[in-house]
Image: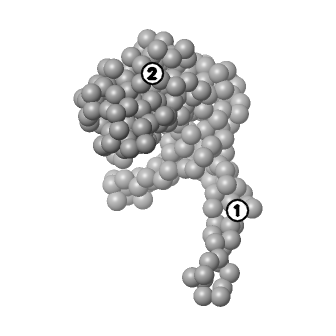
Amino acid sequence: MSSIQGSLVRAYLYKAVWTLTETSGGSEYYLRVGAETSGVITMASSTGADIQTLLLAMTQFTAGDVTVTGDAGGDFTITFLADYAFSGIGVEIANADATAVVAVARTFQTTLVTKSEANGYYKMGVETSLDVNMEIENQDVTSKDSDSWRETESQIRQIGLSASNFYASTENYDKLVGQYKLSLPVVICYTEPNVTGTEQIQNFGVYNINNITQNATFGTNVEFSADFQLTGSPTRVVTGA
């Protein structure tokens, strides 16, 4: 196991957006968010508004925390907002009919990251010195196809992000602190230096907030220190190649 540190360009908070897809099969299913399960969703007839109503009926949410758009029988977009805007909270299919074909997946933007909040990103202000600590583990992948040789493969076991000069608007910082107090993870995208003016390597992950400390305020912005720890596996997206 080894540790890698690198200096990167930018880090962004990412809106918690999911795509729900109904394909075919049974008549009903449920969604599980955190520890709660929704009321029944009827295949091919429940609309995005119906699903939104079911999610907002959960005790963890209040009006404005989540929106669901989409027409019956098609794809739905689930977006968490307000106190859950950056949340890495999970969404799962629960108690589906045995023949139902329905899936839910976190979605990531595949265009260049910009400073615009409209495309789902909120800049955290790390321009030059975001430390990325990777613990890498070699796993034995020897099989009958290894031609009598032992084969190993390096895999990332965990990733930590830290910096002493994060910046965010007061509003976004307050949301981060709220996530920390509720022990909720956040979705972070950090970018590697551009290879060209149109190519960008984006690394998405769901991170727990290990600690967060306010250092100073500058008008409507807050400078703070924080440490984030990856949960699950990272997703790497190359855009503009």
Q: Is residue 70 left or right of residue 201?
A: left
Q: What's under tag 2, amino acid-wise?
A: Gly
Q: Is residue 102 left or right of residue 206?
A: left
Residue 137 showing in the rendered view? yes
Q: Nearer the viewer, mark 1 or mark 2?
A: 2
Cα gap from disc 1 to disc 2, whole angstroms: 42 Å
Q: Nearer the viewer, residue 47 or 10?
A: 47
Residue sitting at x 38%, y 27% = 41
Residue 61: x %, y % from top left:
51, 16
Residue 6: x %, y % from top left:
62, 53
Secondary structure category for the residue under label 2: loop
Q: Is residue 111 left or right of residue 73?
A: right
Q: Residues within 10 Å of mark 2 (few under 14, many from 20)?
A: some
Q: Nearer the viewer, residue 35 or 236?
A: 35
The residue indicated by pointer 1 is: 137
Q: What's under tag 1, amino acid-wise?
A: Glu
Q: Residues within 10 Å of mark 1 (few under 14, many from 20)?
A: some
Identify the image quadrant of the C terminus. Answer: bottom left
Identify the image quadrant of the N terminus. Answer: bottom right
The residue indicated by pointer 2 is: 39
User: Which of pointers 1 and 2 lies earlier in the amino acid sequence?
Assistant: 2
Residue 139: x %, y % from top left:
68, 67
Secondary structure category for the residue under label 1: strand
Q: Nearer the viewer, residue 70 or 37?
A: 37
- Mark linked to residue 36: none
Residue 179: x %, y % from top left:
60, 24
Residue sitting at x 37%, y 23% = 51
Residue 177 showing in the rendered view? no
